Amino acid sequence: MPKVSPEHLEARRKEILDGARRAFAEHGYEGATVARLEEATGLSRGAIFHYFENKNDLFVELAIEMNTRFGDILLERGLDAAFRALAKENPEWLAVLIETESRMRHDEDFVRRLEAKAADTSPRIQEWFQQQQAEGKMRDDISWMELGRFTTSLLNGLALRVAGGDPFDIDAMLRLLNDAIAAPRKPRKVKRPRSVAQKRTA
Amino acid sequence: MPKVSPEHLEARRKEILDGARRAFAEHGYEGATVARLEEATGLSRGAIFHYFENKNDLFVELAIEMNTRFGDILLERGLDAAFRALAKENPEWLAVLIETESRMRHDEDFVRRLEAKAADTSPRIQEWFQQQQAEGKMRDDISWMELGRFTTSLLNGLALRVAGGDPFDIDAMLRLLNDAIAAPRKPRKVKRPRSVAQKRTA
């Protein structure tokens, strides 16, 4: 048997996940049978379940990836990029994801794996908001924690809209969001030599 | 058999819905058995299913009520009141509602009934945003349609937070929302008699 490089294993894993995502999007969680997973990935069930324990495991991996995707984009490319990526998501896949995730919140293993991943990403996102505020880019009359909660709530609400096929203007959403959380624009600086002089002589 | 007034029928219906909501919140949709519905409402199954066809029918009524509740509060008492009502919702009930609704989006009858009710409320909510903008209370550089979409997306995202038991500061959320959608504060009016004079003589 030829040696398989870690890169090859990782590429094959990704290939399976991409195919599975398409199958879930098209047929729903229940409808994505093993035969359909084979068809979508172009691989045999033997090959698929060599990389993933079972269908549930495949779904959990995809859910974890989606739950951290927008956080990752935020950290790498900023807020606007994260929201624009969401707006372009496949509505069918988002709908299946939201439905299945909501059903799985009773599944302890699922919740544990999701939280383990979130434990890695969440502090970095919180730090990002904290940093934005410290740098004077976000308003400082509301805690960075609440600025983050506002932003992620909007993101999740828009995810529901995308999943439901309900339209929105992403540019308008981003202007509204940024106007809410941005630091207020400073008034133009005006030289006021007289008031300085007044102070000095006071 | 004594005559039963419409008021009595309506009160009884409401009593059943209230009990059913508690049973769904506590036990989930599947777990809310007929025995538990009897216990929660204090009524026999015969009485319950005199008013509602079946458990699904009960749930659909509750879902429709919740889907229009925040719109109704908005129309009657304004935006802040609607968001504050959401923040005080029972997390368990919201979680069951979101999960079951998401599962039922494939159910044509459910979707039809929900849309029939929304067809009544949605235009009134749209009109409300339009009106706020026309009265100069909301910014007019973004369409009232998008202002409404932004607001409802935030509301839905916060509903997910409430359902997940994740905290947020409702006052902070409302300040951020209002800062996003409100008309910009006008600069203080300054008498400018000269420019009027200029206009007149122009």
Image: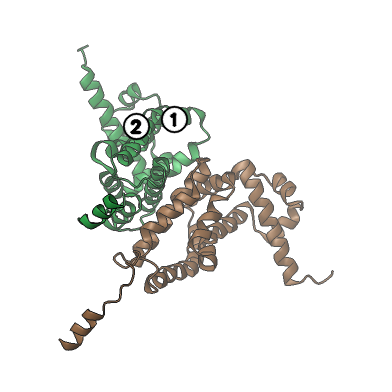
Chain colours: A green, B brown
Kind of residue at badge 1: Glu
A68 shown above or below B95 = above
* Labels 2 and 1 touching (C-beta < 8 A): no
Q: Which residue position is annotated with label 1?
A: A115
Label 1 element class:
helix
* Quadrant in the picture for residue B148: bottom left
Foreground disc of the pair 2, 1? 2
A135 relative position to A166: left or right: left
Kind of residue at badge 2: Arg
Q: Residues within 10 Å of mark 1 (few under 14, many from 20)?
A: some
A152 shown above or below B176 = above
**Residue depicted at 35% across the width and 34% down the height:** A127
Expressed as whole percent of the image width and height from the top left, the position of residue B34 reads: 69, 47
Between the C-alphas of marks 2 and 1, the distance is 14 Å
- Quadrant of the snapshot with the N terminus of chain B: bottom right
**Residue depicted at 76% across the width and 53% down the height:** B43
**Can residue A31 be seen in the rendering of this structure?**
no
In the foreground, A201 or B198: A201
Expressed as whole percent of the image width and height from the top left, the position of residue B22 reads: 66, 48
Q: Residue furthest left?
A: B202
Q: Residue furthest front?
A: A201
In the foreground, B115 or A72: A72
Same chain, labels 2 and 1: yes
Label 2 element class:
helix
Q: Which residue position is annotated with label 2?
A: A124
Q: Residues within 10 Å of mark 2 (few under 14, many from 20)?
A: some
